[in-house]
Image: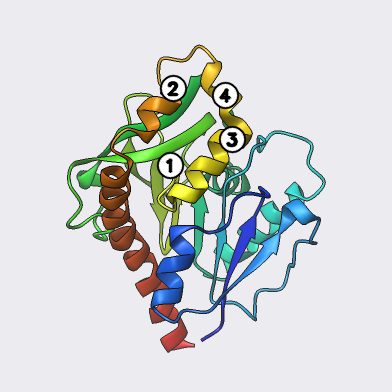
Amino acid sequence: MKPIRIFRHLVCQHPGYLGEYLQQRAIPWEMVCIDEEHPVPQQMDDVSAMVFMGAGVSVNDPLPWLEGELQLIRKAFDRDVPVMGVCFGAQLMSKALGGVISRGEGMEIGWHPVQKLAMNDPQGWLDGIPDQFNAFHWHADTYTLPTQSQHLLRSECFDQQGFVMGDHIGMQFHLEMTREMLENWIERYGSDLLLDSACSQSAQMIFKSLDQHMEQLHKISDLIYGRWLQRVLDRQGKA
């Protein structure tokens, strides 16, 4: 099987639980470290799918590598190469396909409930997932839905939390979190928690019942990652 190519934009953001999930299933993957100035590879004949992770910047910032990633996402959609976007990655997907990225009302940080919109899910992406579950969030921007996509998930703080389009999925929240990642983010970006925002939790609240939160989160991760990976494997079988 061709590897899944994962694009990293933060020096402290590895694939986390996503990497563990793929490794446990013997799915090959590789990392492109944009934060280390790796060029954006435009070829995709050598990959089975692509994942775009989060970032501490905005899709609207004048970033030297941004247009290369937007072009790559558009090519992936044209060629039916499955894409997953995480937080900033979901916003990249939206912008690449004509959506608009804008600042939300404050930041959404911490463990907040996400509601699924089952009526928009004829493909069964969310089958077996509770109508509401807690996910981990850390973002200030939001996006508009790309044309022909289905709005799958929302929260009280930010209406746009997840969409699908064919075999592609974008999620505003983070399913890939691990304790190590969380500790690293708070160490590096904890000043965000001092901002006045109704949807931002304190570090104490974030770490409260953390093991329970992580266990429940990874159950959701297994289901959503599994649905996306099955689509990747099905396409490999047809190649």
Mark 2 or mark 4, which has the lower sequence index?
A: 4
User: Is residue 177 placed above or below 166 in the rendered structure?
Assistant: above
Helix, strand, or loop for circle 1? loop
Q: Is residue 156 left or right of residue 49?
A: left
Work out whether residue 127 can be spotted. yes
**Amino acid type shown at disc 4:** Asp
The residue that disc 2 covers is: 200
User: Is residue 33 placed above or below 119 in the rendered structure?
Assistant: below
Determine which of the numbered discs, if any, sits on residue 192 in the image.
Answer: 4
Instruction: Tell me, yes or no, whether the two marked residues, 2 and 4, touch with CB atoms within 8 Å.
Output: yes
Q: Is residue 90 left or right of residue 41?
A: left
Helix, strand, or loop for circle 4? helix
Residue 94 x %, y %: 54, 44
Helix, strand, or loop for circle 3? helix
Select label 3 or label 2 by which is in front. Answer: 3
Residue in front for this viewpoint, 160 or 32: 32
The residue that disc 3 covers is: 187
Taking the spot 48% from the left edge, 42% from the top edge, the residue there is 182
Determine which of the numbered discs, if any, sits on residue 173 in the image.
Answer: 1
Mark 4 or mark 3, which has the lower sequence index?
A: 3
**Amino acid type shown at disc 2:** Ser
Instruction: Tell me, yes or no, whether the two marked residues, 1 and 3, touch with CB atoms within 8 Å.
Output: no
